Structure formats: structure tokens, C-alpha cells
Image: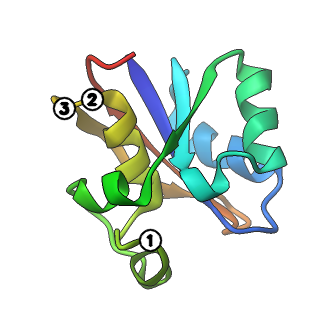
Amino acid sequence: MIVAGFGFRSGASADSLRAALALCDVTPDCVATAEAKAEAAPFVALAQALGVSAVAISEDDLKRMPVHTISQASLARYGTGSVAEAAALAAAGPNARLLAVRQISPDRMATCAIATGDQI
């Protein structure tokens, strides 16, 4: 199972998310983000366009994940240095590992990280 985790600003478009995913150069089995962002139109549109399920990760689960990169904004709002990395790891399951650390879209509106694991 390959999970693409996303973090994104409120003004991000589906193109922003696609651009961040393209930097990871992988086709995911599902996409994941913070519960507070999971119903955002660009995230839902991306999942539909890819034909994959969208997973909402609770803030408590995000905080528990060991991430490699640190965004001060993410740390202040979600308690994790990278929503993208934490969401990917949480959705991929207990034995998950990162395949790609957080990548930032060219417009700096979205981030994507890739994890692999046994979940879903």
C-alpha cells in the first residue's frame, strides 16, 4: 500500500496538490490528510481524479507520527512538523515507513509525502 499524505493551505487548488504529488513521482493507493482538511474541495477532487480513497487523520494520530521535516506553522497548528508526512504514515499503518519526505508544490500551497505500509 502506497499512501500520499498532504498538507495544504486553505487557498490551495487541486492543481497545487497534483503538483506536490508529481514531485514524489508515484501513483498512490490512497490519499490522506488532517481530519480538519479532509473535506476540502481540492483534496476531495484529487482523490476522485485519482480514483482512490481519501483518509482523514485525527490530530492525535498526526502528533504521534515521527516526521523528518519541520514546518513551524504545521507544528503550531497540528502539533506535528509535517502534516503530509504524519498523515501518510498514519494512514499506512503501524509498520509504515516514509518513501518520500515532504515535497512542496511550486506555488508553495501544498505539500506531499509518501509512505508505504500494510494498512487498508
Sequence-wise, the earlier of marks 3 and 1 is 1
The residue indicated by pointer 3 is 94
- The residue nearer to you, when weighing 41 against 116, is 41
Query: On the rendered image, what quadrant is the C terminus found in?
Result: top left
Element at label 2: loop
Confirm or deny contact between disc 3 and disc 1 (CB under 8 A).
no
Element at label 3: loop
Sequence-wise, the earlier of marks 2 and 1 is 1
Query: Which corner quadrant of the image does residue 60 belong to?
Result: bottom left
Label 2 neighbourhood size at 10 Å, few (<14), some (14-19), many (20+)?
some
Q: Position of residue 48 (x, y in %)?
A: 78, 23
The residue indicated by pointer 1 is 78
| Residue 76 visible here | yes
Confirm or deny contact between disc 2 and disc 3 (CB under 8 A).
yes
Image point 30% across, 62% down: which residue? 63
Amino acid carrying label 3: it is: Pro
Amino acid carrying label 1: it is: Tyr
Q: Residue 93 carries which label?
A: 2
Element at label 1: helix
In three-dimensional space, the C-alpha distance between marks 3 and 1, rounded to whole angstroms, equals 20 Å
In three-dimensional space, the C-alpha distance between marks 2 and 1, rounded to whole angstroms, equals 19 Å
In three-dimensional space, the C-alpha distance between marks 2 and 3, rounded to whole angstroms, equals 4 Å
Residue at the extreme left of the image, as rendered:
95
Q: Position of residue 105 (x, y in %)?
A: 64, 58
